[in-house]
Amino acid sequence: MIAGSEAESAYFSWEAIEKAAGPKELVVIDGATHIDLYDKDEYVAPAVVKLTEFFGKHPAG
């Protein structure tokens, strides 16, 4: 899961990650709001890097 450090909805991610089965990881993008993670490259790019790393280690299926 990915959440912005400034997202008012970040607590949903914390609650979900606690309940999720593994493999799991919560990545917090410093300075980002929830909406920033949709289209601001300075926040989207690091999120994509983390997603690529995670799914490279833990392929679906």
Image (cartoon, rainbow, N blue to C red):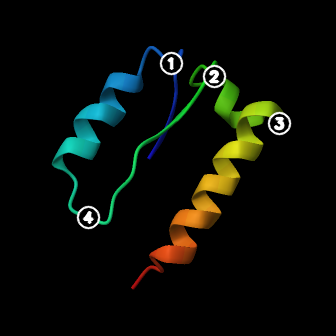
Q: CA distance from mark 3 to mark 1?
A: 16 Å
Q: Cα distance, mark 1 to mark 2? A: 7 Å
Callout 1–callout 2 Cβ contact below 8 Å: yes
Say what secondary structure mark 2 lies in.
Answer: loop
Q: Which residue is mark 1?
A: 7
Q: Residues within 10 Å of mark 2 (few under 14, many from 20)?
A: some
User: Given the image, on which type of amino acid does mark 3 rest?
Assistant: Asp
Position of residue 39 relative to residue 49, above or below, is: above
43 horizontally vs 19: left or right:
right
Element under label 3?
helix
Residue 39 in picture, x, y percent from top left? 77, 34
Counting labels gives: 4
Mark-to-mark CA distance, 4 and 3: 29 Å
The residue identified by callout 2 is: 32
Residue 40 visible? The answer is no
Q: Residues within 10 Å of mark 4 (few under 14, many from 20)?
A: few
Disc 2/disc 4 C-alpha distance (Å): 25 Å
The residue to which callout 4 is attached is 22
Residue 7 x/y as whole percent: 50, 18
Counting from the top left corner in percent of width and height, residue 3 is at: 49, 33
Q: Earlier in the sequence, mark 4 or mark 3?
A: 4
* Residue 1 appears left or right of 4: left
Residue at 69 percent of width and 35 percent of height: 38
User: Looking at numbered disc 2 in the image, what kind of residue is underneath it?
Assistant: Ala
Mark closest to the chain's N terminus, 1 or 4: 1
Residue under numbered circle 3:
41
Query: Label 4 sits on what residue type?
Result: Gly
Q: Residues within 10 Å of mark 3 (few under 14, many from 20)?
A: few
As drawn, 55 above or below 6: below
Residue 25 visible, this orientation: yes
Residue lying at 69% horizontally and 25% vertically, measured from the top left: 36
